[in-house]
Structure formats: structure tokens, C-alpha cells
Image: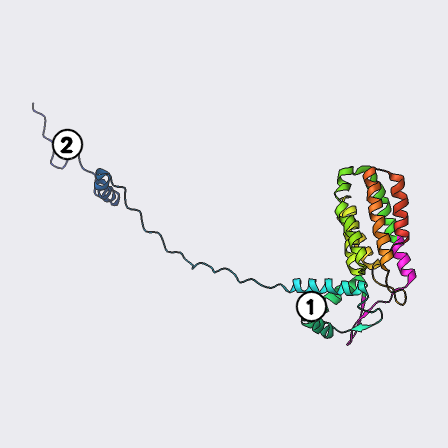
Amino acid sequence: MPEPRAGRSGPRPGRLVPEPRTERNRADDDAAPQARSGRPPAEPPLAAPLTAPVPPARPVVQRASVRGQILDALRTALVSGELTPGEVYSAPALGDRFGVSATPVREAMQQLALEGAVEVVPNRGFRVVERGVRELAELAEVRALIEVPVMLRLARTVPAERWAELRPLAEATVRAASTGCRATYAESDRAFHRAVLALSGNEQLVQIAEDLHRRAQWPLVGPPASRGRAELVADAAEHTALLDALIAGDVDVVRVLVGEHFAGAS
């Protein structure tokens, strides 16, 4: 008996039935000519940036830098005796003197008040603190209690080559002393002591010691208002002698020199 023929609704044997047309099929068909021609497909256009490029910011003059410059200038005026102990100075008057507004001067004076250099006088300005010989001696004693033990410990532990690196600072104090300018010498003096104590690695120690050192450099009230050139030269010579002893590792000499140095410190 012969097999029945397949209905027209079904596929004939041996013939492929094409897949239904879809979006993916059409995309493949579109890409086929490019693949056959060897040309790379066209890249889609880049999207436009969502925001316009930000222009570089204009340089801004920081008021803190002005305040810092005024603070340094006021500290120099204090050390040199240009700001007289006991006198009252107004921020506007000092601003005119430095060519700035009263605001950075007032801010700098507030910092000096925190350091104990001046006192606030309501509605008038700032009075330069009057210091006597007793206060100077007390400051020297406190500095010795802090710095001498540290220097003796460093003399036993720091190698000679590290001490030799401080030679330029010691020589700078000698040159500053030769000018006879108290303010110039004060800066180089603090720089030398700061570098010595920095070898301890204790930043708090360095900060406290420098604050005491700065206060010890303010002039006394009444004569003598400041140290003379000969005294500055002698003080600077102690720096070089101390450095020589530290390089040599002679702790006994270091002990004597630092004792003498703080006994005459100011």
C-alpha cells in the first residue's frame, strides 16, 4: 500500500525552512555586504559631552599669606625693639605702616597675644608686654630643663656625619652676629637650635622649645634694651664650639658648653 503524501502545511523532506525575519536577522543582513567587501563597519558617532569644559580657576591670593608676612614683620619689630615694650599700637596704624588693611594686622596681633608677646587693650589696640630680668631667667631655666637632656642624649646616639650637616647653620649664626642686628641673629639662632632638636624626631619637643626660644628673644623693658654685637658674636661662637664637640662625640665637653650656653641665654 503506498505511503500517504505529506500535507501542504508541513515542510517537504530535504528543504530548509528559512527562519522568520527578525530585527537581528535584518541587522546581520545589513552587515553582510560590509563583511564581504572587507570594509570595517562604520563607527557610531561620539556622543556630545554633557557639560562644557570647566575653564581653569583664576589664582586666588590667600589672605593667610599676607597675615603670615605681617606676623613675621611684627616678630622682627618685637625682637629689634622697634615695637617698644609698654606701648599700645592700633591695627589701622600698623596697617598703614605696612601698606595693608587692618584685618591681617589684627589677626597677626591676635596670634602674638596667644604667644604672650602683646596684650589686647579694648578699643585701643595691642600693648607690647613688658618683660624683666626675672622672666628672662625663668625662660632660660625652662629651656635648659628641656633642651640640655635632649642634647646630651643626642650626643651619644647621633653619628658625626649628621652633626657635620649642621655646620652651615652654625656658620650662619656667626655671620648674623657680625652684623649686630638682633633680629637677623635671632632667626639664625632659632634655626640652629631647631635643627639640633629635630634630630630627636620629636616634633612636639621642637615646637615647644622654639616657642620658649622665641619668647626669650623679646627685648627687656628699660636698659639694656638689647644685646650688643659683642654678646651676639660670643653666643654664636658657642654654637660652633658645641658643634665641634658633638662631631667629636665628647659628651663631657657638650655638657659644659650647653650649661654655659643656657646660663647666658637671652
Residue 42 position (above or below residue 132): above
Q: Which residues are magenta?
A: 118-141
Colour setting:
rainbow
Location of mark 1 (residue): 104
On screen, residue 48 versus residue 3, left or right, reads right
In this rendered view, identify the residue nearer to me: 158 or 145: 158
Using the rendered image of the protein, determine whether residue 69 is visible from the camera's viewpoint: yes
Residue 47 position (above or below residue 96): above
Q: CA distance from mark 2 to mark 1?
A: 95 Å
In this rendered view, identify the residue nearer to me: 264 or 202: 264
**Horizontal and vertical percent position of residue 224:** 89, 64
**Horizontal and vertical percent position of residue 264:** 90, 54
First in residue order: circle 2 vs circle 1: 2
* Circle 2: residue type: Arg
In which quadrant is the C terminus drawn?
A: bottom right
Identify which residue is drawn at 85% across, 45% down: 241
- In the picture, the disc for residue 15 is 2
Identify which residue is drawn at 62% across, 63% down: 62
* Numbered label tally: 2
- Give the secondary structure at mark 1: helix
**Horizontal and vertical percent position of residue 16:** 17, 33
* Circle 1: residue type: Pro
Using the rendered image of the protein, determine whether residue 266 is visible from the camera's viewpoint: no
Does residue 94 show up magenta in the picture?
no
Identify which residue is drawn at 84% across, 45% down: 242
Residue occupying the far top of the picture: 1
CA neighbours of label 1 inside 10 A, class few (<14), some (14 to 19), many (20+): many
**Horizontal and vertical percent position of residue 127:** 81, 70
- Give the secondary structure at mark 2: loop
In which quadrant is the N terminus drawn?
A: top left
